[in-house]
Image: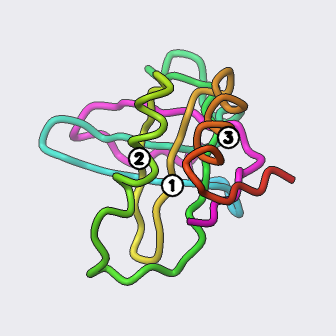
Amino acid sequence: MNLTLQTDSLAICRLDADSRVPAWATTAGCFLSITRTTDELSIVCVDTVVPSGVRHEPGWRAFKLEGPLDLALTGILASLLEPLARAQISIFAVSTFDTDYILVKASQTEAAVQALRAAGHKVQTG
């Protein structure tokens, strides 16, 4: 698989399930994922826009799986997550219609690159 390390530092935010999507999260041109469930509103966005007082965890980096990928493919995430799990690297996955993103803590970025490459994946970091 071919992956590209994205440049933005991201935050994973948790708001109440009935919260409106806040304007600060929708910074144009930046990574944004919004997921609402009956339990919560989760937002992944650039960490520089998250106001104080919002429950969040900053300092995540995203690896983009180069796509688009056919939705019928199986085992894609497993092939990426297995070497990261072996390397004791926690992840947060985000999927879109066309592809997947794997987020790792910024402090584990280099270890993630090494683990993915050792498993035969191509990782572009520049």
Q: Which mark is residue 93?
A: 2
Q: Nearer the viewer, residue 28 or 72?
A: 72
Would you say 57 lies left or right of 19 here?
right
> Does 110 sit above or below residue 100?
above
* Residue 118 in picture, x, y percent from top left: 62, 44
Do residues under tags 1 and 3 come within 8 Å of each other at their CB atoms?
Answer: no
Q: Secondary structure at mark 1?
A: strand
Comes first in the chain, label 1 or label 3: 1
Q: Which mark is residue 91?
A: none
Q: Which residue is mark 1?
A: 101
* Residue 109 in picture, x, y percent from top left: 68, 32
Would you say 96 lies left or right of 35 here?
right
Cα separation between marks 1 and 3: 14 Å
Cα separation between marks 2 and 3: 16 Å
Residue at 55% x, 34% y: name it: 104
Q: Which residue is mark 3?
A: 113
Taking the view exactly as shown, the residue that stands out farthest to the top is 53
Do residues under tags 1 and 2 come within 8 Å of each other at their CB atoms?
Answer: yes
Q: Residues within 10 Å of mark 3 (few under 14, many from 20)?
A: many
> Does 111 sit above or below residue 82?
above
Magenta span of residues: 1-25
Q: Is residue 24 magenta?
A: yes
Cα separation between marks 1 and 2: 6 Å
Which quadrant of the figure contains the N terminus? Answer: bottom right
Would you say 111 lies left or right of 99 here?
right
Q: Nearer the viewer, mark 1 or mark 3?
A: 3
Comes first in the chain, label 2 or label 3: 2
Q: Amino acid at mark 3?
A: Val
Q: Nearer the viewer, residue 98 or 33?
A: 98
Would you say 125 lies left or right of 4 here?
right
